[in-house]
Amino acid sequence: MPPVPRITERHDFVSVNAVRTSRAAVALTFDDGPHPTHTPMLLDILARYNVKATFYVIGQSVRRYPEILHRIVAEGHEVGNHTWTHPTLSRLGNGSVLSEIDRTQEVVWRTVGALPVTMRPPYGAMSSQQSHMLNDQRNIPTIMWSVDPEDWRRPGSSVVADRMVRGAQPGSVILAHDIHGPTIRAIPQAIEGIAARGLGFMTMSELLGFRRWGPRGLRYVSAPSASYHQG
Ligand SMILES: [Zn+2]
């Protein structure tokens, strides 16, 4: 099997909450999938509105539902790295953190031939040292968020949508989870409300001004897979 490539792009930032941009756009981001029923429902909604989003996927779930990852990428969305087992990274040593990231890079690469170029820590729990370590050693910056509707508390779809709309500004990174039914049902209202405020939707890479993300969108160098695993 060919080795999993490494990202060679260097970034002058390590961690991002919102993007400073003149573009009137936000990034919709969905964590914790792919989910066998909620993610396809969300993809149907996004397609209806022609909105592209970013999915921070759990590596183990990608291994379980590869066909859903195929669909995410085929429909023009971006995939980010949300670790292999969804641990609290701040409690782990560097070797374990690298292993969580690398295994997920590998399964995404082997499934869709594209490599996540950003990561998001589960629970937002990661030390500054760990973010620097990942950026130095894997060229993968940490993406947090600037709008949190707290959808995981299940406050109801219209509350989730309203929080997303009210928080949205140019460069906002909006956090949601595609494993909750009420979140999925909030998305049409959220998209319409955000659009009504004059804001469009970009994937994380687009908002950051990276080169186009996708199966052939970035330059990589090959690394021997033996040295790629460090955990
Ligand atoms: Zn998560």
Image: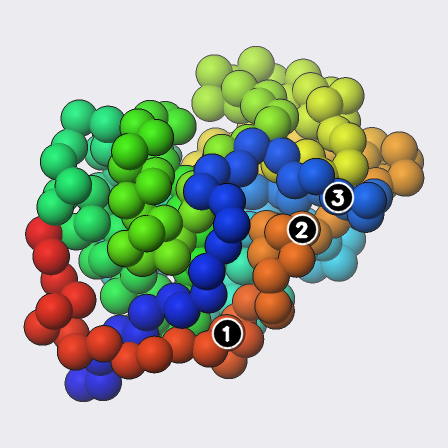
What's the CA distance linking mark 2 and mark 3? 8 Å
- What's the residue at 51%, 80% (across, down)? 216
Q: Earlier in the sequence, mark 1 or mark 3?
A: 3
Q: Position of residue 201 (x, y in %)?
A: 74, 49
Q: Earlier in the sequence, mark 2 or mark 3?
A: 3
Label 1 sits on residue: 218
Q: Position of residue 72 (x, y in %)?
A: 52, 62
Q: Position of residue 172 (x, y in %)?
A: 68, 35
**Quick one: SS at disc 1?**
loop
Q: Position of residue 56 (x, y in %)?
A: 44, 47
Label 3 sits on residue: 21
Q: Are marks 2 and 3 in contact (CB under 8 Å)?
A: yes
Mark 1 burial class by Cα count in 10 Å: few <14, some 14-19, many 20+: some
Label 2 sits on residue: 207
- What's the residue at 31%, 48% (across, down)? 134
Residue 228 vertical placement versus 189 (above, below): below
Q: Are marks 1 and 3 in contact (CB under 8 Å)?
A: no
**Occupied quadrant, residue 68:** bottom left
What's the CA distance linking mark 2 and mark 1? 16 Å
Identified by mark 2, the residue type is: Leu
